[in-house]
Amino acid sequence: MAEIGQRLTRMLDWVRRAIAHRHAPLVALVVILACSLAARVFDLEAPCSQPCRGADAHTLVFDESYYVNAARVIVGIHPPAGSPYHEAPLGYDANAEHPQLAKIVMAAGIELFGDGPAGWRLGSVLFGLVAIAALYALVLAAGGGGWLAAGAAGVMALDNLLLVHGRIGTLDIYAVALMLLAAVFYMRRRPVFAGLVLGVAACTKIVALYLIAAFVLMELGWTLRARAGERAEGAEAWWRKPVLGLALLVGATVVSLLTVLWLLDLTVPPWDPSTHRTFTDPFSQLAHMLSTGLGLKAAGAPGISSPPLRWLLDQRPIDYARVAVNTLVNGRIVASHAVVDFRGEINPFIIFLALPALGAAIVAAWREADRVAAIGAAWCVGTFLPFLVASALANRVTYLFYMVIVMPGIYLVTARLFSGRQLSRAAALGWAIALVYGFVHLYPLRTFSGH
């Protein structure tokens, strides 16, 4: 028994030394990225009818029916009859309500890997991994420690909503990855570079611009704190000039957005299927996107839509794609087992902690000048409020998957809640186990996840 005790002691000492090594969080990030890659590419072709032969046998998941078909038109492939944009002129972007960039990436995937799931979805896989790595970098840029950075990256990797959008051909994951890179530059006091990247992010999905509101809120908070007699340690010179930083950010964003949109319009002009109008300049294109977005009203039965406050308190999950195996007895279905179940749903062990973690982050940002808490809280509020205002004042229809761009802030504040002195290691371990359970329970390929 004494020998066994000594071996356990030596093993624990080795674990402590390994965890304390300065490169250990980076190793943890590599492991997280490797596991995330495996989770995203596993059976990437699903769902697919049997026999699974040819592009038409693969089911397009949720809004892939719009974006994948738009990418097909860009590369000169007519979508199947009855599909969106079947009649669109080849070489144009028929999904004119969104910028072209992400669809051009999908089109490049089709050119490289063929008209199939690899071509449609590998871009999302890549940008999903970039987003995880960028969140890690953002924590470091905000002054957080390596293990907090790895923890936030792990929380992102275990969220079903980001997993699903990181393996299907939709636009949101492209925007999130680039928004996080822009935030890294901004927190490293490079507002011009941040603006240039944010402008490119808006060329994947225009809602990326909501991140500007997050930066404004963060700067406003620092300014109010300074006027109350406090100073952010080691950052006084920077935070005394918030207007200059924001002006540089906004100016660079506008220049980047207009320049990239102009180049995209020259390369792949947007074409509106309802009016058959082609947009040849970024200003008319932006006006069309704005009018189309505001024209989507919440009327009648809610369907898959839900108001923004419900996203935080009582999710209305969206069934993206489902394939079930039925058990028949005397010709009647007595049981149904889902083997593929893509759902727009946030890991419940993340979202149900969002509000308390946000409150704790706001307090820490004010009292302790915690920059991780500040950017996390500002991201949560700044990217969420536009959806809330649009829903309340313009009766704009909203959906749970809009939370994709809000979630990085929630990952930051919830990971921070379980770090350092906030809660015990036992509580952090328990939460980590709960996160893994929630991830496995919602994993879309149910045979693999043990359902």
Image: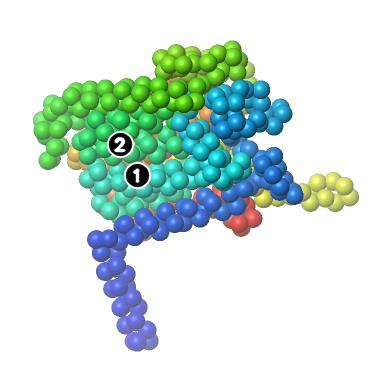
Quadrant showing the N terminus: bottom left
Displayed quadrant of residue 262 = top left
Residue at 62% from the left image edge and 52% from the top image edge = 446
Residue 292 drawn at (x, y percent): 51, 16
- Camera-side residue of 297 and 277: 277
- Camera-side residue of 124 and 119: 119
Q: Quick one: SS at disc 2?
A: helix
Residue at 60% from the left image edge and 18% from the top image edge = 273
Residue at 22% from the left image edge and 39% from the top image edge = 188
Quadrant showing the C terminus: bottom right
Residue at 45% from the left image edge and 31% from the top image edge = 101
Here the colouring is: rainbow
Residue 352 drawn at (x, y percent): 45, 41
The number of numbered discs placed on residues in the rendered structure image is 2
Residue at mark 2:
183
- The kind of residue on which mark 1 rests is Ala
Q: Earlier in the sequence, mark 1 or mark 2?
A: 1
Q: Quick one: SS at disc 1?
A: helix
**Does 323 sit left or right of 100 as displayed?**
right
- The kind of residue on which mark 2 rests is Ala
The answer to the question of whether label 1 and label 2 lie on touching residues, with beta carbons closer than 8 A, is yes
Q: Is residue 367 above or below residue 203?
A: below
Q: Is residue 104 above or below residue 299?
A: below
Whether residue 207 appears in this view of the structure is no
Q: Which mark is residue 134?
A: 1
